Image (cartoon, grey):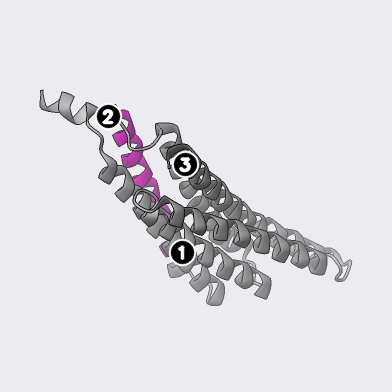
Amino acid sequence: MEWIRNFIQPRQNVFHKLLIQQGECAISGVEALQKYLKNPGEKRGEKAKQTEKEADEVQRILIHELEDTFVTPLDREDIFAMSQALDNFIDYVYDTVNELEVFDLTPSESMKTIADLLLEMAHELHLAMQRLMDHPRVAGQHARKIKGIEKDIEKAYRENLSHLFSGPEEVSYLMEALKAREVMHHMVHASDQGDRAADIILDIGIKWY
């Protein structure tokens, strides 16, 4: 009978803690990216990879808990979508480091600027996860900040593209510019996932509170 009781009773704390852990992984992932951008090296790349693996494990546990729980504190679709957006955020941050290594690309100041904004976004995501259950309106405030940061990242990305492709037309330069654009695509995709998480937070506030 114990398994039946565990299946049907609400388990708010389990899901809340796991989402907060994903928020912590988001911060760790961007911090690893920042360190790599300042001083590229194998150990710093490994730190980003390890964070991505840890985040994947947290999401596996969350999905397992969803499968084993009948009553959830929020719509299970919202919990899953939130977790997926956070996991995607972390994946794209790791992809940024991975492609910098693959392309053997020297980080630019624009990449560092966007990474700083991603760290700010990660902190806001973490705070939103902490406040989601008990203080949803405060979580909504953090969500709106996230959406503002996403706009700043998009602006920084487009300004850098304009600068990149206004340089020399030599093949070697263009190849480096294309590599840089590909790397920054991952950073922008990460911010898009942060924006998606913010939308889910705002939707939860409308539906539940």
* CA gap, disc 3 and disc 2: 22 Å
| Few, some or many residues within 10 Å of mark 1 (<14, 14–19, 20+) | many
Residue 70 magenta-highlighted: no
The earlier-in-sequence mark between 2 and 1 is 2
Mark 2 and 1 residues: CB-CB less than 8 Å, in contact? no
From this viewpoint, is residue 25 visible? no
Please give left or right for residue 169 compared with residue 71 in the image. Answer: right
The residue pinned by badge 3 equals 204
The residue pinned by badge 2 equals 68
* CA gap, disc 1 and disc 3: 20 Å
When the figure is inspected, residue 32 is found, relative to residue 80, above or below; the finding is: below
Looking at this view, name the residue that lies furthest to the left: 1
Q: Which mark is residue 123?
A: 1
Which residue shows up at 54% across the image and 53% down it? Answer: 194
Q: Is the stretch drawn in magenta largely helix, strand or loop?
A: helix
Q: Percent from the top left, x then y, of residue 147?
A: 60, 56
Amino acid found under the numbered disc labelled 3: Ile
Which residue shows up at 81% across the image and 63% down it? Answer: 174
Amino acid found under the numbered disc labelled 1: His
Which residue shows up at 23% across the image and 27% down it? Answer: 8
Please give left or right for residue 135 compared with residue 140 in the image. Answer: left
From this viewpoint, is residue 183 visible? yes
Q: Percent from the top left, x then y, of residue 20?
A: 36, 54
Q: Percent from the top left, x then y, of residue 94?
A: 51, 56
Looking at this view, name the residue that lies furthest to the front: 209
| Few, some or many residues within 10 Å of mark 2 (<14, 14–19, 20+) | some
**Residue mark closest to the camera, 3 vs 2:** 3
Observer-nearest residue: 7 or 174? 7
Amino acid found under the numbered disc labelled 2: Asp
Tell me the magenta residue range: 47-68
